Amino acid sequence: MVLAAGAGRRLRPYTDTLPKALVPVRGGDDGDTILDIALANLAAVDLRDVVIVVGYAAGAVEERKAALEKRYGVDITLVHNDKAEIWNNAYSMWLACDHMTDGVLMVNGDTVHPVAVEETLLKHRGPDVLLAIDTEKKLADEEMKIQVTGDLALSRITKLMDPATAYGEYIGATLIEGAAVPRLADALKATFERDPDLYYEDGYQEMVDRGMRIDIAPLPPGTAWVEVDNHEDLAKAREIACRY
């Protein structure tokens, strides 16, 4: 699954007419997009039934759907978020829960990363919910930081954390087993009903606060990835995407 409903206003003019996931990152302005890399990664680990949550400029994804299916050998289902421009992504993820009954590997539609991320999650498959974590990156205020318990279960996940107290950064990729989906859906619903501006990661925190265990999978050392929020991030994405 790819969460690709966001507008990405800090990436204008690219996102004047395109969702952030369709911003090109490899091969020039007509080259591969963030979504291309996400789909290529999923196909490489033989995950070929793909749900894409769309919202802002959804028509641009719809227009490319058939071509993307053919290029990557995947079957794409689009889930429409009609509140994408006014609500945050806890609602986006909740909308797709009906498609997760057999489990899902979910990636953010604004993250450029190598297939090693998907491979790491699948290698450590077993826990109900498993988050991909970068334990090497120097952290600041913008990152989605985590803390863990003594047995390496998630205890806290938020951007609003002193970086010095963080174990690492959640990179926007999660493996969710089907058995956990009803609990996830209920936690996400409680989260956006409390505040529609909350992130799906706040739904993970809701699960933890309810006593549910969420596990972590640290990435291999030196994994090059970036969350593309602004033009500086985009420049980094274009530099590292050429290595994949």
Image (cartoon, grey):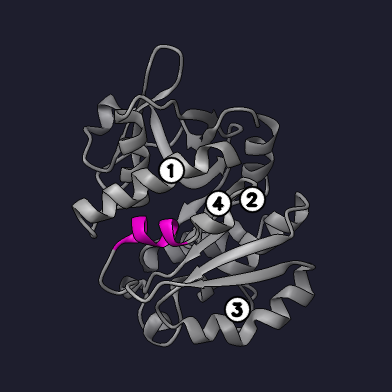
Which residue bears the numbered disc 4?
A: 106
Measured Cα–Cα span from mark 1 to mark 2 = 26 Å
Which residue bears the numbered disc 1?
A: 184
Could you tell me residue 147's position as x and y percent? 34, 26
- Mark 1 vs 3: CB contact within 8 A: no
Query: Dot 1 surroundings within 10 Å: few (below 14), some, or many (20 or more)?
Result: many
Measured Cα–Cα span from mark 4 to mark 2 = 14 Å
Query: Dot 3 surroundings within 10 Å: few (below 14), some, or many (20 or more)?
Result: few
The type of residue carrying mark 3 is Gly
Q: Nearer the viewer, mark 3 or mark 4?
A: 4
The relative height of residue 130 versus residue 159 in the rendered view (above or below) is above
Please tell me whether residue 238 belongs to the stretch shown in magenta: no
Name the disc covering residue 114, or none: 2
Looking at the image, is mark 3 or mark 4 earlier in the sequence?
3
Looking at the image, is mark 1 or mark 2 earlier in the sequence?
2
What's drawn in magenta, residue-wise? 88-95
Looking at the image, is mark 4 or mark 2 earlier in the sequence?
4
Query: Dot 4 surroundings within 10 Å: few (below 14), some, or many (20 or more)?
Result: many
Quarter of the image holding residue 125? top right
Measured Cα–Cα span from mark 3 to mark 4 = 27 Å
Could you tell me residue 38's position as x and y percent? 62, 60
Which residue bears the numbered disc 3?
A: 28
The type of residue carrying mark 1 is Leu
At mark 4, the secondary structure is: strand
Could you tell me residue 61's position as x and y percent? 56, 80
